[in-house]
Image: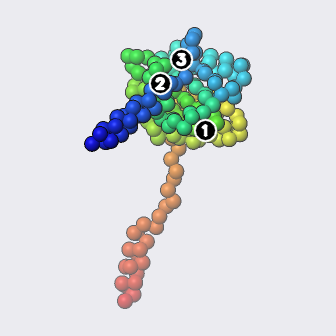
Amino acid sequence: MKKTVWLFLGMLFTCTWLYAQEVLPRPNPPRLVTDQAGVLSASEIQTLEQKLVALDDSSSNQIAVVLIKTLNDRPIEEYATKLFREWGIGNKKTNNGILLLVAVNDRKIRIETGYGLEGAIPDVTADAIIRNVIRPEFKQQNYYKGLDNAVDALAKAAVGEYKVARKKEAPSGGRGGSIITFLVILAVI
């Protein structure tokens, strides 16, 4: 019984310790682009920052772009959620923030949205932006272009203007052809 209690307490402590691991501290003074991975030039950071500030001013939707080197084997979903909450991205009243998190060495990308934008940017849309907008540019080492295009796509999605391209299904013969064939065979017989 004592072993079970100690095992339970050990697991509880481990889970608490893992969750309590620190995330990147919020920049001071606050800014919307943080490149700890060192993949963007100073002018690219400045241009992207200006774009994000203008977007925040015009729509009140706040997008923060954070690039880190590695997650150190931590799930990106947990890290993104904790970073989003600790940094307080978006307006507290409307909860309309978006975090675009990139772990460069791990090749992981996550778009975390506040509750106020979950309807406009569901996981399907976020995954489509990652898959169709960001990844193709990142594969070519075009980090700035991928992030810039992603910001445009997220801004459109936040106001309902981004549409996820759906694959067209191949037309199937369906039952119509087989019914006609059956009727022809039946008439012949």
Q: Secondary structure at mark 2?
A: helix
Q: Residue furthest bottom?
A: 189
Q: Is residue 8 above or below residue 85?
A: below
- Coordinates of residue 15 in the picture (x, y in percent): 41, 34
- Compared to residue 44, the image places residue 11 above or below, namely below
Measured as percent of width and height from the top left, residue 73 is found at 54, 38
Residue 141 appears in the picture as rendered: yes
Q: Nearer the viewer, residue 100 or 106?
A: 106
Element type where label 3 sits in the image: loop
Q: Quick check: marks 3 and 1 in contact, CB under 8 Å?
A: no
- The x and y percentages for residue 55 are 55, 19
Badge 2 is on which residue? Answer: 84
Q: Nearer the viewer, residue 115 or 56?
A: 115
Task: Residue at 37%, 89% (x, y): give it.
Answer: 189
On-image quarter of the N terminus = top left
Residue at the image point whose x is 65% and y is 41% from the top? 136
Asked whether the viewer can see residue 152, the reply is no
Residue 151: horizontal and vertical position, in percent? Answer: 58, 28
Q: Is residue 45 left or right of residue 109?
A: right
Residue closest to the eye, 105 or 51:
105
- Calculate the distance from the C-alpha at mark 3 to the C-alpha at mark 1: 22 Å
Task: Assess disc 2: are there few (<14), some (14-19) or many (≥20) residues with their C-alpha within 10 Å of its C-alpha.
Answer: many
Q: Disc 1 marks which amino acid?
A: Asp
Mark nearer the N terminus (3 vs 1) = 3
For residue 106, the mark is 1
Q: Determine which residue is flagged by label 3.
A: 26
Instruction: Give the mark, 3 or 2, whose residue is nearer the N terminus.
Output: 3
Q: Nearer the viewer, residue 166 or 2?
A: 2
Q: Residue flagged by tag 2: what amino acid is it?
A: Phe
